[in-house]
Image: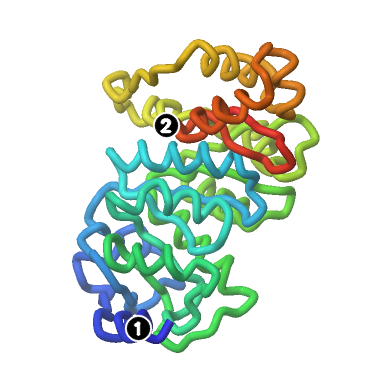
Amino acid sequence: MLHFEKYLQDNFVTIERTDGLYPKAWKTLPDAPERLYAVGNTALLRKRIFVVVGSRRTPANAMKLGETIAGELSDEFVIATGSADGGDTAAIEGAWQKGVICLLAGGFSAIPQANLPLLERVAKNGLLLSLHEYDTPVRTFSYEYRNKYLAALGDGVLVLGAGEKSGALITAKYAKSFDKEIFALPYPPKALSGAGCNALIKKGAHLTESAADVFAVYGVDASSRAVKIELSADEEKLYETLRERGEGHSGELSAMTGIPVFKLRAVLSALEIKGLVVSLGGNRYSVV
């Protein structure tokens, strides 16, 4: 942390409300701060921005899908998110190479320790942004204040995972008040980790299974982005089985596909590498 803290202090800049880099959408908010605090590529604030968020309890398969979607969306948008574990991390992992904006809940001295290595990458290849002075601690109300400004920053908001009372829903609530487009991943009925996402969809959010669902709303042609992934016969058989079931135990999958368990593990690993399958733990796997 010490070398990163020095990096933050050495590269720390302020953005005044009168500066052209100060987001226009924020200037109209009555409680907008007079200055922002930033480390990284401030020019990202001039580009078209899309927000991707999710709760800390976003499940592994939604994390993997969210990472893929964020990466593809970063071809057209700068992805903006928070700095927590879970859905925020998936957004950062997917988009950091092209430059992602992370809006902190407190000042730079209160940067989340659990995500430190990833936030170091953002500081050097994207933008860490704060609404607060350097030594401001994170308080209970800080998250809602941050989520409000995050919602205002982008053209729309995608929620990767949210329980009934997730902070990601606060971001979506403010996005709706700002007349932003809202998107959400769909979850199986009674899935607690996605109850909030399903509720958003019932209320009119765009059901989102891929980046193409987002691009379609903004009139972006995504057809040229499709990449054909070559699969072996066993990989295709296993993948199609998982697509039909959603998820399954390795023993069940072996019985259903006729692929011996010792061979099935290698096939599952190959599908994981290709970004089509994710491990849920306990020898259970899910399609992405």
| Residue in the picture at 29% in, 54% down | 99
- In the rendered image, the residue lying farthest to the front is 262
Q: Is residue 207 visible?
A: no
2 or 111: nearer the viewer? 2
Q: Is residue 272 left or right of residue 13?
A: right
41 or 27: nearer the viewer? 41
Q: Looking at the rendering, in which quadrant would you find the C terminus?
A: top right
Q: Nearer the viewer, mark 1 or mark 2?
A: 1
- In the rendered image, the residue lying farthest to the right is 190
Where on the picture, by quarter, is residue 225? top left
The residue under label 2 is which amino acid type?
Ala
Marks 1 and 2, how far apart in space? Answer: 37 Å
Q: Position of residue 197 (x, y in %)?
A: 64, 40
| Residue in the picture at 42% in, 54% down | 92
| Residue in the picture at 45% in, 56% down | 81
Q: Earlier in the sequence, mark 1 or mark 2?
A: 1
Where on the picture, by quarter, is residue 180? top left
Tag 2 residue: 211
Tag 1 residue: 3
Q: Position of residue 151 (x, y in %)?
A: 47, 54
Q: Is residue 176 visible?
A: yes
Residue neighbourhood size for the residue with mark 2, other residues' Cα within 10 Å, grouped as few (<14), some (14–19), many (≥20): some
* Label 2: which secondary element: helix
The residue under label 1 is which amino acid type?
His
Q: Position of residue 36 (x, y in %)?
A: 33, 75
* Label 1: which secondary element: helix
16 or 96: nearer the viewer? 96
